[in-house]
Every structure is written in structure tokens, then in C-alpha cells.
Image (cartoon, rainbow, N blue to C red):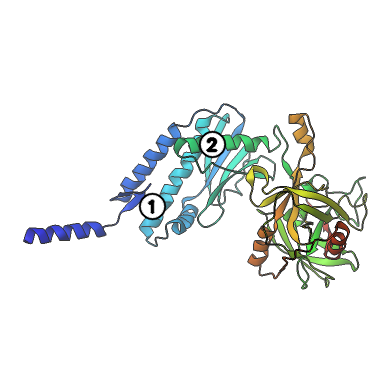
Amino acid sequence: MTRICILMMVLVLAGCARTFKYDNVSYPSRELALAAARTDTDRKVAGVQVADEKVGGSILVVIPTNDIIQQHGVVTTGNPSQESKGYVADVLEIGFLGMADVVKRGQVFDHVDVGRSPDPEGETAGGYDYKLWLLGKSQSEWQWYLSKSGDSYRAPITQDKGLAGSARLASFNNSLLKSVALMGKEAGKPSRVDKESSHPPGGGTRGNSSGLGTAFFINSAGFAVSNAHVVDRCNSVKAVLPEAGTASTVIVATDQENDLALLRINAKPGAFAQLRLGPTVRQGEQIIIYGYPLAGALASKGNLSIGVVSALAGLLDDSRKLQISAPVQPGNSGGPVLDQQGNVIGVVDSKLNALAAAKLTGDIPQNVNFAIKAGVLAGFLEANGVAFGTDTAKRQLNAADIGDKAKAFTFMVQCYGHGY
């Protein structure tokens, strides 16, 4: 009887002992679990074949420092113990370094170096042709991005979540190849609309400003929305309102990742836009954009163009974007994309670089443009405590009526001391 009781006590104590899980297998110690993670990662990396295609050149792969990884790892596990925090951080680090090894093993680039930084996005890639870096998109998600040296555009690297093991890692190299092809080395890339020509045609400037874009009022308090790339290098910004003339403007906040800017205009708006957050935008819906393209050459009172929603995602299936066919030009950046009720479903953001794409394909792509979705804009406004209105009206308006509606809340933005 005594032996049975002792055995039961041992079993109970063993059941209460701390265990560490990796890939749904429990290990009695942190060290054994980490060893299993390393072995598993090494096995998957070893199974990755050399890529059929090659980019060449050099690339710097940057992962976050361990303390940054740990901050995200805590939320991933939900376990408050310091020991588990460190364990999860180490497991994530093993996986991240394994991905860097995949880049080397795939032999897509001639030379690969790996570095660490508390701010991988801000880490310079001096001396390298490309930089691949890892960012925490949220408290429990990580996302790889690729950029070309000297270019501010970045492409997210997507992986096929339906794959597992070495096959999923191999798909990472394929995504790298696709991203490079879209970044202008051999093909076109989306370029910020106003970076192609930050001055009006003819070499002159308008009111001594050195950059022009579009913005629109979002509420009656004078808050307005534009693109971050329109205002991010401005010493000062002014709004040119259709009826009230020039008004001073304050840049309240910017979101570089989503290319959004929040402005406060020193004027009372005559009208403001309503966002459409439902029903879901459908492929093929007719849209209208309103803005101030090619100021100094085209009509100064605003321009309207018509198109459709070509796709419900941007390049590389970027879910934050819509692809639209309505023509856009330098100066359209930051303007509203409107549905047939005159409500905002997006913000004009970028377009495919037609000249660069033509060098690869021998043909000029037509009207491949992109807009930030209204849902992303709503999140940005909520994060900054700014009120906005929504509308689910179903009555369709004709293009002329939508143009009149947009003209009342859309205006030109002049950037002074632009750094482009």
C-alpha cells in the first residue's frame, strides 16, 4: 500500500513538472526542446534545393535582436513565466536564422550576410544590392520584406501556408525571385505616384512649392487624409481649397508602412467624405477617383477619372490594397477612390512603373494602379483618435454627381521644401 501511495505521489509530481512543447511534443527541459527545434529546422533547411533561377549580387538578411523577438514571443505563448519567455524567443530565433540559411542554400544571390538589429527596417544595407528584413506586423505575427538598395519601395515576401517543412521554405526563395522581378532590377515596380514627377511639367513650380498631391476632408473638425509620401519630406504643407483658397496645414500623424498621412487644416470644411466599410468591395465595381494631377498643365479645378476595381489585392497579394484601372498621374496621390454612391473605398497610392516593365516585357502595361483600402484607413484614423463617418447608402449616382460630391471635400496639397 505504501509503495502504491509513493508511486501515485511521483506520478502527480511528474505531471506538475514544467514541460516545454515544440511541434506539439512535450520535453522535460528547455534545452531538450531547443535541441529538437534546431534539429527540425536544420532538417528542413537541408531539404531545400538550389533555385532554378538566380538573381546574383549581394543581400543582407537582418533579423531582430533577441530582446525584440522576446517581446513578441511573450504574446505568442501567453505564458507569463520568464523561463517560457526566453524559450519561445529562442525557438523563434532558431526559425528566423533557419530562414536566413534558406536564402544562402537557395543560391539565389552570389553573397549573403546575416545581421541583427533592434530596428531591422532602419538598418542600412550599405554595400549590398538588396536587404531582406523581418518585422513584427502585430504582437503575434512576423513578416519578411525585401528592398533594393537606394529604393524606398519594399515588397512583402509571401509564403504558401498550405505547404510544410522544406517545401514551405523552398517557396520562400520563389517568393524572393518574384519580389526582385517586381522591384525594377528586371521588371516594373509600383512607384509612388508623385515620386515620378515632384514638379509640375515644364520645370516650373507652383507657388514655389516643390511637391504636389491630393487630400480630402474626413470630418467637420478639419481633419484630412493624404499619403505619407506626399508630405513626409516637407518643411511645411499648405492646403489649396477650391473655395477658400490657401490654408495652413499641420501634419498630425503618418503611417509609413501603409502610406497614410493625417492632416489638420486651418479652415472649416464645406463637406467631408464618408467611408464605406461594408458591404465588401467587389471585383469589377465601377469607381471614380478625384484629384489634382499634373498641376500647372491640366485643369487646376480638379480632375475626375473613371475605372473599375481590377483586383481585390495589390502586388504579391498585398491585402491592404486594391488594384484599380482608373488612370492616375503625379498629383493624384492621396486622393479618394469613390464607389458609385460617392463613398470612399480607398486612397490613391501607387502605380506600376510602366517604363521599367516595358524593358522586360516589350509592352507597356496600362492602368495598373493601386489604392489603400478604406478599412486600413479606418484603422489609421481610429489609432489616432479621429472621428469619421460611414455610409451604406445603396442609391447609385451618376459620374457627374459623384464628381460634384468629391469636389466639395477634395483639395490640392502643396509641399514646401520637398526632399525628393
Identify residue for label 1: 87
Q: CA distance from mark 2 to mark 1?
A: 27 Å
Residue 119 seen in render: yes
Q: Secondary structure at mark 1?
A: helix
Residue 128 seen: no
Instruction: Pinpoint residue 349: horizontal percent, then vertical percent.
Output: 74, 51
SS at mark 2? Answer: helix
Q: Quadrant of the N terminus?
A: bottom left
Q: Callout 1, which amino acid? A: Tyr
Q: Position of residue 231 (x, y in %)?
A: 76, 57
Left or right position of 362 against 79: right
> 278 or 416, which is in the foreground?
278
Q: Quadrant of residue 243?
A: bottom right
Q: Nearer the viewer, residue 68 or 239?
A: 239
Residue at left offset 38%, top offset 59%: 82
Q: Is residue 149 left or right of residue 38?
A: right
